[in-house]
Image (cartoon, rainbow, N blue to C red):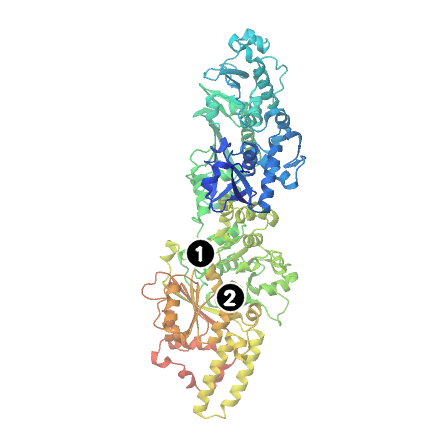
Amino acid sequence: MIQPLSITKELPLKINVTENGNFRLMSIGTSAEQWVPSLYIDHRQSFFGLQAQIEENALIATPVEMMEIFSGKAHPFISFTGENHDSNEWLRTFKEAATTWSSPDLWNQLNIDGVNIEVNAPLEEKGKILIANAVKQKLFQAGLAMEDVPSLVPFFQQGGWPIKSQATHPSLMVAIRLSEPEEFDDTWLLETVVRGKKSSVYWTPSFRKKSLPIKDALPDKWNTFSEYIAETQAKIFSLISSIDPSNLDIFFTSPLADEEVRVFLRDDLVKLQALGFEVILPAWLKAVKETKMRVKTIAQTANTYKTAAGLNEILKFNWSFSLNGQEISPEDFQTLVNENRSYIQAGNEWFRIDAAWMHEIRELMKKSEDENWTVKELLFREIPEEIALALDDDNDQANEDPLFEFEMQKSLKSLMDQLSEKKGFPEIPISPNLLTTLRPYQQLGLDWLVFMRNEKFGACLADDMGLGKTVQLISYLLHVHEKEEQPTPSLIICPTSVLGNWQKELVKFAPSLKVQTHYGSGRTKEIDMTADVVITTFGTAMQDIESLEEIVWASVTLDEAQNIKNMHTKQSRAIRKLNGAHHIALTGTPVENRLSELWSIFDFIHKGYLGSFRKFQENYIVPIERDNSESIKHKLRVKIQPFLLRRTKQDPELLLNLPEKLEQREYCALTTEQAALYESLIQETVSKLDTLSGFEKKGLILKMLSKLKQLCNHPSLYLKEPFDNAEDMLDRSEKLARIVTMAGEIAASGEQCLIFTQYIGMGHLIQHCLTELYDIDAPFLTGSMPKNQRDHLVEAFQAKEFPVFLLSLKAGGTGLNLTAASHVLHADRWWNPAVENQATDRAYRIGQTNFVHVHKFITIGTIEEKIDKLLVEKQALSEELIHSSQWITEMSDSDIQDLLTLSI
């Protein structure tokens, strides 16, 4: 028997679900462009597959597309099968779900619970999920939200699903029309209108026929369409929640007040348009989105201010209003607010206005009259957000046509500019007891600190490293304790690693100040109340907080204030308990970019200004860190700016006043462990000197010098111990802690630095700590490094590929061009200053455009400090006298003993 010839072709499909719930369909061996039109043969919405999404030879289809495709006609000659079991199951699910989807009974099988849709049809679970997702997607495509759905269910159950144009009649269009009020009237008109499909003119019954049944009111040519018109009108008003028609057997016509129009446009218009009904609006209403109402206020004060004393003066506001360029009196504006109008006519034009916004403006006017805002509150943005944003947008060119404008009288604006731009403060006379000359920007820093003190504002001096925050604060302390005769000392809290530096700098620049160092296991718990300045460390302050918080200090200053960045630590909470007439934070890091650190610092300098941390997190941290909100960043920047003085070495006006190279000694104290080892080594060495010949004595001294320098760097180098974790290693050497912390800060600020050391072990130790604590991979150039590797590292550093470069003093001291560095750190001192200078000149040489800051680390009271003093004295002598370290061995026994003695 001959089998009939089959002309149907089977096409196998592989079907997968994508991450976002769409479907990926592919036919192996056949391009998607060939088979997709066969699947979409009855899908008019996508122009039969022309708009289908094809990626990498696969069709990407949504749940809605799957429902619509399998609800339509199948291709007469091509059938689709699954390439595997899962794909076959999906094809079966599509066909079964599509039957439910296209059923008139669909919306009787759906339950809506908030944003969830439950399908009660006799389907497997994945078929139910497919329909629920397709329904949600179809609603979204139509511009409908899930909260709109409950009121639409009756419409969908009565044939309004699937969503499509409701212009289904071949000859007639039924619509609803909204007309604006006539002249000298204030009511709108909403009515049902009809037109022929080939006409553009809408028809509605004459006044005398409006009360007749629809069939009797129609012209004879449309008389047979009365039933269709009545059904369509009923459908329309079943969707309008804001209007309850009394009789839909007649053509609907009704006057509407402004508020009713606003509700209709807000709640019903979108639904009607989304579901395919035609709504005719006045042309101007389609075009005009916002009112042309403009509100402007000018802030002024009773006096013309020439000094900062005006900060507490009360502001007065003059308000003015205009509509489409025409001025409106405050009384007329108040009338508009009271009438709660949503649409008003000006001349021959109609405008939509936001009544709620106008109420907000009226409340703002009332607040400005009742709350007596001052210039200070304006400066610190402690004012309603509408004014704060308008003030901040003053120079924002993007906002060319604001609805709300804010201006200040000229004298007030001048004062505000001075405060925000840090200019025009009363100049503070420099104490004759300050043993240095302040640069112009440092004088400004002094003026600003004293101004902030007088106005009882906390202050954060955040100048770049090397711009002299220390000397600015010392000049401030001299002023405070000489001019104001304080009953209590000022307190300085700093990291242990810079405690010695503060001791030295105070003695160097302000020897007239009486200083007490409150530190060490042998410290007395009593504070010398006759002192001008008390220096302590963060750790000591936390331990002694109960006694320290009892004193109301003349001022409390935190150096390296980022040490309290974690507001939850015991140390941070203790420090923020301290009481001072003035709180100051010093930091060289850009605190504006570290939000939790910023809150902690501001909670110290001006408690409560940024609110609770929880509120700060909600209002600033989350929108900035999660959403990268530029407007919130700007708002925060404006809010903190008056309390923050930050200058960088890149500021053009500062570079004019800075030397090209600044050398600075960084003093660090020995830890208890280092001091004990130091004393032991000295005693052992000195006891041997008398028994040795001159040649032997020289050898012993040179050997001892090397051991002492390594001990000053870190005890593990002297004891030849393996490295422990970085935190523990830093605890054993203040010098190491200071070097590593400074290198981390330099890298964080986008700058580069060179670190020179004579000892391979010290270089590896610094590498270890930088990697573990700051995730900085710092290469170490030593004498054993091959030339090609050395050249590659130099090029990479110059190209800014890494921020920190460690160099052996001998290997990296000559022949290299490393001008990308703006900082040079000498971890240990070379006894020949010429060698140090040669190393420094790797960064400070021809081609250098950066200001170069040279840091020489010296341990207090040790041979490093004593030889540093000798080198300064010998600089005036011939270079030959200090060509090497041999000059030390030529010293007398008594001089050597004095040189070696530890004096702390």
Disc 2 element: helix
Visible residue check, residue 382:
no
The label number, if any, that marks residue 71 in the structure image? none
> Dot 2 corresponds to which residue?
771
Residue type at tag 1: Pro
For the N terminus, the image quarter is: top right
| Residue under the point 43% across and 57% down | 442
Give the percent coordinates (x, y) of residue 567. Answer: 60, 56
* Residue found at the far front of this picture: 1
Disc 1 element: loop
User: Viewer-nearest of labels 2 and 1?
Assistant: 2
Earlier-in-chain disc, 2 versus 1: 1
| Residue under the point 40% across and 63% down | 822
> Dot 1 corresponds to which residue?
429
Residue type at tag 2: Thr
Give the percent coordinates (x, y) of residue 887. Answer: 40, 83
Question: Circle 2: is it few (<14), some (14-19), or many (20+) Cα within 10 Å?
Answer: few
Task: Using the numbered discs, state the Cα–Cα distance from disc 2 to disc 1 in whole angstroms.
Answer: 47 Å
109 or 706, nearer to the observer: 109
166 vs 15: above or below: above
Give the percent coordinates (x, y) of residue 715. Answer: 54, 76
